Image (cartoon, rainbow, N blue to C red):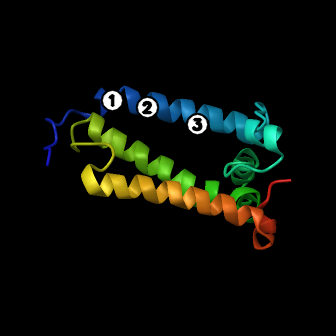
Amino acid sequence: MTTPRAARPWHAMRVTPALAGGGLLCGFALGTGALALPCWFRALTGVDCPFCGGSRALGDLLHGDIVASVGHNAYAVVIVLPLVVAVLTALARWETGRAARWWPAGKAGTTLTIGLVVLTAAWWVFRGLPAGAWFRSA
């Protein structure tokens, strides 16, 4: 087990604020429609990817409409956004020396990674089933 590095003050962070700021700027641009990026997977296959509808879901969240947001892409709202917040928090703790790593090491990290891949694949399959019709982006 690795030990945390010597703690540094919070204002010593460089990477985490840049990633958070860039992510917020991109999220705001995508959510408001100022930046529109078509899904290359959907363009090639005609099938929604697990993240299709994510920009519209983010736009609905910016307007405070949680139900519509979940309707566009529940996975992005329930899994991806909290994961991004957790990773940014862990990265800030790592960058300031308050944690040894920003992603769990060993079996825990491997299990988490595999779990996220399986969950993403399960969401992708579920969206294609008749029961998942409410969650398809249109």
Identity of the residue drawn at 26% across and 35% down: 96
Q: Which residue is mark 2?
A: 17
Q: Amino acid at mark 3?
A: Leu
Q: Position of residue 131 (x, y in %)?
A: 77, 74
> Mark 2 falls on what kind of element?
helix
**Structural distance between the alpha carbons of marks 2 and 3:** 10 Å
Mark 1 crowdedness (10 Å alpha carbons): few <14, some 14-19, many ≥20? some
Task: Say whether residue 78 is left or right of residue 129.
Answer: left
Q: Quadrant of residue 115?
A: bottom left
**Structural distance between the alpha carbons of marks 1 and 2:** 7 Å
Identity of the residue drawn at 21% across and 37% down: 97
Q: Which mark is residue 4?
A: none
Mark 3 crowdedness (10 Å alpha carbons): few <14, some 14-19, many ≥20? few
Q: Which residue is mark 1?
A: 13
Q: Quadrant of residue 67?
A: bottom right
Image height of 132 relative to 6, above or below: below
Mark 2 crowdedness (10 Å alpha carbons): few <14, some 14-19, many ≥20? some
Foreground residue, 79 or 12? 79
Q: Are marks 1 and 2 in contact (CB under 8 Å)?
A: yes
Residue 12 seen in render: yes
Foreground residue, 135 or 82? 135
Q: Amino acid at mark 2?
A: Pro
Which of pointers 2 and 3 lies earlier in the amino acid sequence? Answer: 2
Q: Amino acid at mark 1?
A: Met
> Mark 1 falls on what kind of element?
loop
**Structural distance between the alpha carbons of marks 3 and 1:** 17 Å
Q: Which residue is mark 3?
A: 24
Which of pointers 3 and 1 lies earlier in the amino acid sequence? Answer: 1
